[in-house]
Image (cartoon, rainbow, N blue to C red):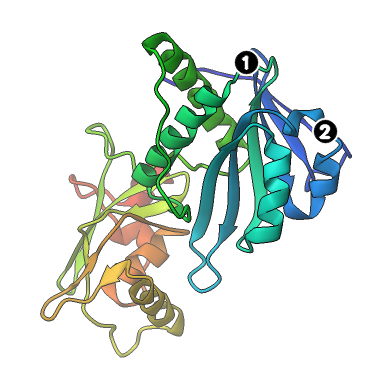
Amino acid sequence: MHRPKTIQLFLPDGNARSVRIAEITSRTVQAIQVPRTKLSLAAERAETAQVGVYFLLGEDEDTGKPLVYVGEAEDCLKRLGQHHRSKDFWQRAVVVVSKTSALTKAHVKYLEGYCYEQIQAAGRYALVNAATPTKSFLPEPAVADVLDTFDTMQILLSTLGFPLFEPLASKSPETHLYHCTGRGASARGEYTEDGLVVLAGSTAAADEVPSASASVRGLRQRLRDESVLEVTPEGPHRFTRDHAFASPSAAAGAVLGRTANGWVEWKDAAGRTLDEIERA
């Protein structure tokens, strides 16, 4: 269960697009967001030159898919400088440290491996690590402490705009599912903070109607190019993974292969439209 929290954001140079330091006021964990162009400012902050876990964030130039590299270091600032010289894909980094210097090399090595597993499971970001990090051995009480740190880290990263560990769809038994059918397609979706998420395994029309708009045709082709939509020899396309659409209408258009009003095309098991439920 989520409980209310107070999160403090500190802007060292007063610029909201520059270095930002986030913390839950009752916790000892800090997350420092560092734009690549502001490494010199980050070097003036003692927070970044500590033992910690860090994330390099960017996107694939061809597909726009968000990319992440997860690592750990005894001096995160020094490691960011090394990656500045050796890795091109990233535009921002987030460093996670303890305000009380409570994290050790063993702690962050365990966190690195655990974060890698959780990012992979969530599926929002493509991992670019050349090798899979291995978790260090920790006694059970230390693991409990590290996982508590992870819980705080997850909240802070999402607050900074990087929901690395949060699946697009909850897939909980209590989730209100919507369906979109027609032209041989049968899709299931969730209406979330990210938009309308079409679930993996859903099917989409095998082609576009002649009157389909250029935007619908372009969207479906991008989904094919990114292997989100799998072309089958016969029958409808298949969604290979969960995919978030900015609007219900874009999701319906991708599923049906035609221009569609998603607010009325997406319906729950009782036949109520998304419009009736979400905009009543």
Q: Please identify the quadrant where the C terminus is shown.
A: top left
The image quadrant of residue 213 is: bottom left
* Figure check: 22 above or below 3: below
**On the image, numbered disc 2 is attached to which residue?**
45
The image quadrant of residue 217 is: bottom left
- Position of 65 with respect to 91 (left or right) is left
Question: What percent of the width, then of the height, locates residue 64?
Answer: 52, 66
- Foreground: 230 or 245? 230
Q: Residue furthest left?
A: 234
Q: CA distance from mark 2 to mark 1?
A: 18 Å
Disc 2 marks a residue whose amino acid type is Arg
Residue at 34% x, 88% y: name it: 211
Question: What percent of the width, then of the height, locates residue 229?
Answer: 29, 70
In this rendering, does residue 56 appear at all? yes
In this rendering, does residue 280 appear at all? no
Q: Earlier in the sequence, mark 2 or mark 1?
A: 2
Residue at 70% x, 55% y: name it: 84
Quick one: label 1, few (<14), some, or many (20+) residues within 10 Å?
Answer: few
Question: What percent of the width, then of the height, locates residue 271?
Answer: 20, 50
* Figure check: 24 above or below 68: above
Question: What percent of the width, then of the height, locates residue 198?
Answer: 31, 56
Q: How many marks?
A: 2
**On the image, numbered disc 1 is attached to which residue?**
102
- Foreground: 204 or 33? 33
Q: Please identify the quadrant where the N terminus is shown.
A: top left
